[in-house]
Image (cartoon, rainbow, N blue to C red):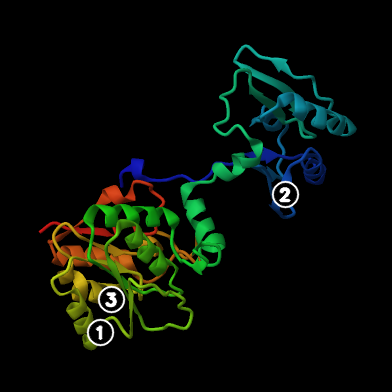
Amino acid sequence: MNPTTLRSIEAKAFVPARDFDLSRRFYKAIGFTEAWGGSDLAEFRHGDSCFLLQKFYVPQHAGNFMMSLLVEDADAWWEHVAPIAATFGKPAEKPADQPWGMRDFPLIDPSGVLWRIGHPINPTPPKVREPTYRDRLQMSLADWMIHHQEKIVFDKVSWMGVRTLKNVLDCWIYQEILWETSPDVLIEIGSYAGGSTMFFCHLFDLIGHGQVLSLDIDRTRYQAKHPRLTDITGDCSDPVIVAQVQTLCAGKKAMVIHDGDHRAAAVLRDLRLYADLVPVGGYMIVEDGVVDLFTPQASAKLGWAEPGPMAATEEFLREDDRFEVDESRERYIATYNPRGCLKRVK
């Protein structure tokens, strides 16, 4: 295996303790949180920093053991830590500027372990100026996707008051495609409440051209109504439904957006059924392949254990060379449709 492909997760130091309970109280007192612990080992954390406190003590080892804690403000830390450390008989010297570019102060724990707690004298300015937004904007993109799926998309996204189970960045891409390709008909496979259905109808209003065919097997929550809209209720793979769509699209440029049954076998079946309706230069969009990117362990609402839309897309592309993935439609990165914007090229 190439070592450059291996990923590390975390490195932790084993900090020795002569009196395990005393050291435990010391670190809790100065602000560390005990994440877990037993009678001879405990993990302590503060922010993203962590270490393991171990009931193990050899004087020569402990007396030469050093830890470095990088903080935002060493002086503020000293003001907090110094009086607490003094109660343990471990006075902390005041912070000082060091020739190696740090402003820090030494702190010795009850076992003789030396900590140097400091900040860079000329620190890199934070990317986000406002502290209120700093933590929020420093989350990873993967964490944002999970946050959006678990806290936003199911009940906090709407179009003109109608629920819309979409990533709004993908909706922006849709309006670009509709404007650039000007389809006569947009076939939406799976409409749920109809928020996206209304969104497409209103885009066609702005463009001045286009009709929407909504295909769904269940209209229980469906609220969409518009002069440009035709509802077809039933299983999109039913030959009768397929024939009806073909008739309505005869002689017209069609675009397909698949947001129906997301299981790989169902998606692949539907792509095969509706691909011929898309002209050269047109698009067939496979939604929600994001469930194939995330694991169920990361998010039960975002990750799937079974193959989903992206797996179906890959199989479809292997058997139908008329379509290619248009990666330019993923330029906002945070898409729910990875490898899902299929453009017909021949």
Q: Position of residue 317 (x, y in %)?
A: 19, 63
What residue is disc 3 on?
Answer: 265
Count how many numbered circles sit on residues in the image: 3
Q: Which mark is residue 178?
A: none
What residue is disc 2 on?
Answer: 34
Camera sees residue 323: yes
Residue 172 or residue 129, whichever sits in front: 172
Q: CA distance from mark 2 to mark 1?
A: 61 Å
Q: Residue furthest left?
A: 346
First reached walking from the N terminus: tag 2 or tag 1: 2
Q: CA distance from mark 1 to mark 3?
A: 19 Å
Query: With 224 as the anchor, is 329 left or right in this view?
Result: left
Query: With 304 as the anchor, is 134 left or right in this view?
Result: right
What residue is disc 1 on?
Answer: 241
Q: CA distance from mark 3 to mark 2?
A: 48 Å
Query: With 283 as the anchor, is 73 left or right in this view?
Result: right
